[in-house]
Each structure stands twice: as structure tokens, then as C-alpha cells.
Image (cartoon, helix red, strand yellow):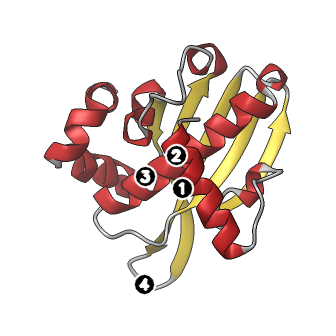
Amino acid sequence: MSFFRSMIILTVFALTGCSEPESIEEISSKILKVEQAGGALYITVKTRGYDGGASDLNSISYIVFNVLEWVMENRPEQQEYVDFSIIAGTVDPYGNESDMKVLSLSYPVTELQKVNWENFSALSIYNLAEPYSHHRIGREMVANYCSDETYQNFARAFCVRFLLQ
């Protein structure tokens, strides 16, 4: 972890009275579930709701980055993949609200082992993902995210890979 980033994290923890996370669930309140099965770690993350995509995926990129960094520092040998399920609030044609899995991001640990976490941007973390959309909302979120020039510059490989699936 870079000195600057470490100082920010320590300051946040000091101000909030928290210590460094001891588990994945402590990284973000948006993490709903963490399960280990076979050679994979499955993590479910909830967006605050569908707002067009770019800001939700930007927010999630920091959660994904922090989780992956934590996993690689604390238990890299326990899995071959780290899989994220992105859940978003949806409304059906009848006005009923529900949570739905809209996007999956799978990260092979062999790729994560190559990352220099001190010099790697959270906005670039999607480039290492194997993405899969489960719902129209997931496709819209990624399309809106990838149409933003800022995110294109950081996540170009992700955007291309997603659009070609």
C-alpha cells in the first residue's frame, strides 16, 4: 500500500474509531455476503440503486479494489478466483421493487498476483475482470460507465471485453 493511501486509511480509521478491517465484510457496508466454495471466493455487493451506471460502477470499483487488495494480502492461497456479484435495486413493470443480480466480475488470482497494489489505480481494477451481465440494467450500467471519457481512459480493456461478449 502506498504511503499516501495508508495515511488516508489510517486517518479515516482514527476519525471513525475503527481499525484496519479484519474481514472482507468490514471493508464496506455494501458487501452483503461473502462465501468460500471450492477454489472461489464469492462476494455479493449491493449498489445504492440504479442511477444510470457510471457513478455506481465507480463506487463499486473502490470496493472491489479494497477487497482484492485485502484478499491478496491476507489469504491469496485460499482461492483460484474472486467473484463479485453486483446487485441493484430494480422495479418491475408493476411497480414492485426488488434486488436483482445485474453484473458479475470474476478475477483470477493468477492475474491478481501480478498487481503492484501500491501503484495500481482502483479505476483500473475492472481491466483485470472477466465480466458477465445478467440483466439489461447491468449492460446499461457498463455502457454508461464506458461512455464516460474518464472511465474509458482507466478501464478501456474492460469496456472492450464487455462490449465483445
Report how far apart the C-alphas of labels 3 and 2 lie in the structure.
35 Å
- Measuring from the top left, give residue 9's x and y in whole percent: 60, 55
Question: What is the distance, in whole Å, between disc 4 and disc 2 at their CAs?
Answer: 46 Å
Dot 4 corresponds to which residue?
Answer: 94
Is disc 3 placed on a helix, strand or loop?
loop
Q: Which residue is mark 3?
A: 135
Ranked by sequence position, the earlier of labels 1 and 3 is 1
Measure the C-alpha gap from mark 2 to mark 1: 5 Å
Whether 114 is drawn above or below 42: the answer is: above
Say whether disc 4 or disc 2 marks the residue closer to the N-terminus.
Answer: 2
At x 54%, y 55%, the residue is: 8
Evaluate if marks 3 and 2 touch, with contact meaning CB atoms under 8 Å apart. no
Q: Position of residue 84 (x, y in %)?
A: 60, 43
Q: Quadrant of the N terminus?
A: top right
Which of the 4 image quarters holds residue 91? bottom left
Mark 2 is on which residue type?
Arg
Residue 155: percent from left, percent from top: 30, 34
Could you tell me which secondary element the residue under label 1 belongs to?
Answer: helix
Q: Is residue 150 left or right of residue 18?
A: left
Residue picked out by circle 1: 8
Whether label 1 touches label 4, CB < 8 Å: no
